[in-house]
Structures are given as C-alpha cells and as structure tokens.
Image: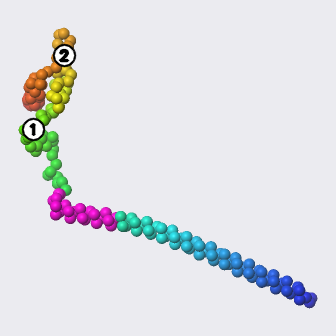
Amino acid sequence: MIMTRDRLHTIGWGMALTICFALMMALTVRVNAVKSEVRLADRQITELSREKMLLDTEFQTRASQQQLTAFNDVDFGLEAPKPAQYLESERQLAVLGKAPSPDAPPQIRVASADADGRPGIVSAVQPLAGRIIGSAVAGEVPRDGVRKPLRASQLEDRLSQVGSRIAERAE
C-alpha cells in the first residue's frame, strides 16, 4: 500500500495536532498545579500574618504588663493581697474604719429582727432630710389604729439601743 502525498500530509497534520493537544493538556495540568501551589502559599501567608498579629498583640500585652509592673514598683508600690490581709467578719472591717469628720452626714443604721422574728424598726429615715417615713415598729398599732411617726430624737434613741439588745441576746 503506497500512500499518497496528500494522505501523508493529512496524517502529519493529524499527528502534529495530536502532539499539540497533548502538550496543551500537560501544560494545563501543570498550570493548575502551580495555581494550586499559589493558593496554598496564599493561605499559608494569610495564616502566618494572623499568627504574627496574635504574637504582636501578645508581645505588646506582655510589654505593657512589664511597664505597668515597673510603674507600680516605682510609683505606686502596690502588692497582691496576702492571706493575713483578709478579714473574718464585718466587725473587723468596722474596727479599721476612721472616725467621721465633723461635716460628715450621720451614718445610716440598719435594724435587726427581735427574738420573736419581728423587725425592730420598720420606718425608714430619709438620709438627707432626716425625716421619718412610715411607721416606727412593726406590730405596734395604737388603739385608734393610726400609727404616729417617731421624732428624730426618739428614732436615734431606739437605734442606739439596737447594739445593746444584740449583746443581751448573745449572753
């Protein structure tokens, strides 16, 4: 079988196209592989930049802590609390208080419950005005059914006796 020149020419072009197509496919696969590597590198760069930001923040935080510690050592002299500094009760805290200044408002006192469970003082005193609001003692109702508010001096007397009543109960 003898091939004609046209036939050889067609086969040659076909082989050339096949080779070009194979090279194009290989090149496409290679380009996609490089694109994939570029995307992976881009993700790694993004991840590393986030990690760098976290490390920068951590470094700045620690640096500011060291700076604050240095300020505290030089300027303030503050220390962490020690177990001996904690108080066991409110009374120990009250002992540490200082005497009120002459222009200080009077202290607000709280009443405690009596032995029968009734509150000792029900009325409230407006701290700024010193006026009594409400009734004086729970359960104490005059015969006419109308409760009279205590005067400030009476209320002061009653409040000053609350501590002595508590001491009597404790004995």
Q: Quadrant of residue 50?
A: bottom left
Q: Is residue 148 visible in this depiction of the protein?
A: yes
Q: Secondary structure at mark 2?
A: loop
State whether residue 158 appears in this view: no
Q: Residue at x 44, y 68 (%)?
A: 49
Query: In this figure, which residue is indicated by the disc labeled 1?
Result: 103
SS majority, magenta: helix
Question: CA–CA distance between discs 2 and 1?
Answer: 33 Å
Name the quadrant of the N terminus.
bottom right
SS for tag 1?
Answer: loop
Pointer 2 with pointer 1, Cβ within 8 A: no
**Does the stretch in magenta take in 69?**
yes
How many circles with numbers are drawn on the protein?
2
Give left or right: position of 111 versus 31: left
Q: Is residue 127 magenta?
A: no
Please give left or right for residue 139 compared with residue 58 in the image: left
The answer to whether residue 109 is above or below residue 15 is above
User: Horizontal and vertical percent for residue 108?
Assistant: 15, 33
**Most foreground residue, 131 or 47:** 131
What residue is disc 2 on?
A: 147
Q: Residue at x 15, y 32 (%)?
A: 109
Which colour assignment does the render follow?
A: rainbow
On the image, the x and y values in percent for residue 119 come to 19, 25
Question: x%, y% of residue 93?
Answer: 13, 43
The x and y percentages for residue 20 are 74, 81
Chain part drawn in magenta: 58-79
Q: Residue at x 84, y 84 (%)?
A: 11
| Kind of residue sitting beneath label 2 | Arg
The mark nearer the N terminus, 2 or 1, is 1
